[in-house]
Amino acid sequence: MNRLLRLFSIAALVGGMVVPALAQDQAKGPPIPNDPVLPVELKKTFTNLRIRRPVAITNAGDGSGRIFFAEQQGVILAVPNDPEVLEPEVFLDIENDVRFKSNMNEEGLLGLAFHPKFKENGEFFLYYTIKDGLVSHVSRFKTMKDDPTKGDPESEEILLTIEQPFWNHNGGSIEFGPDGYLYIGLGDGGAANDPHGNGQNLGTWLGSILRIDVDHKDEGKNYAIPKDNPFVDTEGAKPEIYAYGLRNVWRLTFDRETGALWVGDVGQNLWEEIDIIEKGGNYGWNVREGLHPFSQEFAKEGDKYIDPIFEYHHNVGKSITSGFVYRGEKVPELKGKFIYADYVSGKVWALDYDYETGKAGTNYRIEEPSNPPVVCFGETEDGEVLMSAIFGEYGSIYEFVPKK
Ligand SMILES: [Ca+2]
């Protein structure tokens, strides 16, 4: 190869500009890891159902075994835990109150959590973006008085009204912790680079995980602040904040065995990260992206940042979808591993983690030939993990099975 030709072959045409080989190599990142493959397969399940954009999957913890699929458009479907089921039941329909446009796919009904005592009190909670304006609600709903198998759309009690400066990065995960409090994962408010510095600002809910007590009410609120929330005595801080420095939490979940709070925080330019959340922790955004410096604009002297337990570069995926520490029975190979995926590349992994040393171990691939755009994971009552991927208007549900 002559010299001139070689020069051209090591430069790439990016956005109509020839980028020097060095810059290109930096964007390429580290070598693509050759992750070992687990003998586990993803299998489509609930194949008789037509489910529109399932962005949340969960169970009611009421012994019924039912599985709930929240459609981003604003409808919650319920089915028995039977993969052959033919028709879902509509558990709740608030589609007319939810803002969802197919070209702005971070809005809609984004979170669903059942009260730990749902069986007794019929309460469940939603996170959604409202029809008019850039606002999210976290609301309490109850089941119908005459039919406890259905949610009552008229029962809404708004707990939080969250102003969103931009249409994207709405977060939207809500989960009850082992302490009985409701945890809410928010994004930094959107656009790019966190222009308002929300991640590092304790004076806004954005860029944080909130923790509230839904069983009591403080004056002027439809909920209470847990007394031991970390910033209740910090001047200017929102007392709901449990942890901060987050860009766009796309799923927070609790390990049902250890109670640890796992989070996938979606990155911007180069790095996707997995965090285990400690009370009061600052997870770095936008001073850091993953383990790497990002911007000094909103950095405060003396601040300490908690490192992710794991990160991956954008050469293997560009938007993390965080899942669950597997505590089910059907797939022994997955036991104790943290299942997660990437929405853009469709890769699915299971990560070893040692709580005693605080260190991640081997990151295993779970091979999936079609590389689905993975949107969320959910747990059944008995701890099996389901996964959803969205293809256009409809979703597919997957289960994990040992490879034969
Ligand atoms: Ca971080």
Image (spheres, rainbow, N blue to C red):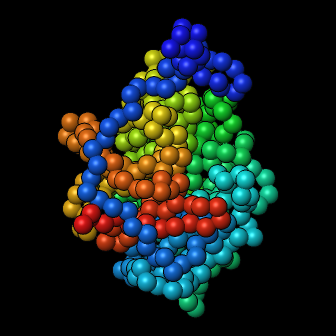
Which residue ends up furthest to the right in the rendered image?
A: 132
Q: Position of residue 157 (x, y in %)?
A: 64, 67
State the image quarter where residue 147 is shown.
bottom right
Q: Is residue 71 above or below residue 127?
A: below
Q: What's the residue at 34%, 53% (across, down)? A: 366
Q: Where is residue 259 in the image (x, y as percent from the top left)?
A: 31, 53
Q: What's the residue at 71%, 64% (across, down)? A: 98
Which residue ends up furthest to the bottom in the rendered image?
A: 146
Q: What's the residue at 67%, 30% (across, down)? A: 196
Number of dots carrying numbers: 0
State the image quarter where residue 361 is shown.
top left
Residue 165 in view in this figure: yes
Which residue ends up furthest to the top in the rendered image?
A: 3
Q: Which of 106 and 179 is in front in this view?
A: 106
Q: In this view, does 43 lie above or below 263?
A: below
Side (left or right) of 41 relative to 28: left
Q: What's the residue at 67%, 45% (across, down)? A: 168
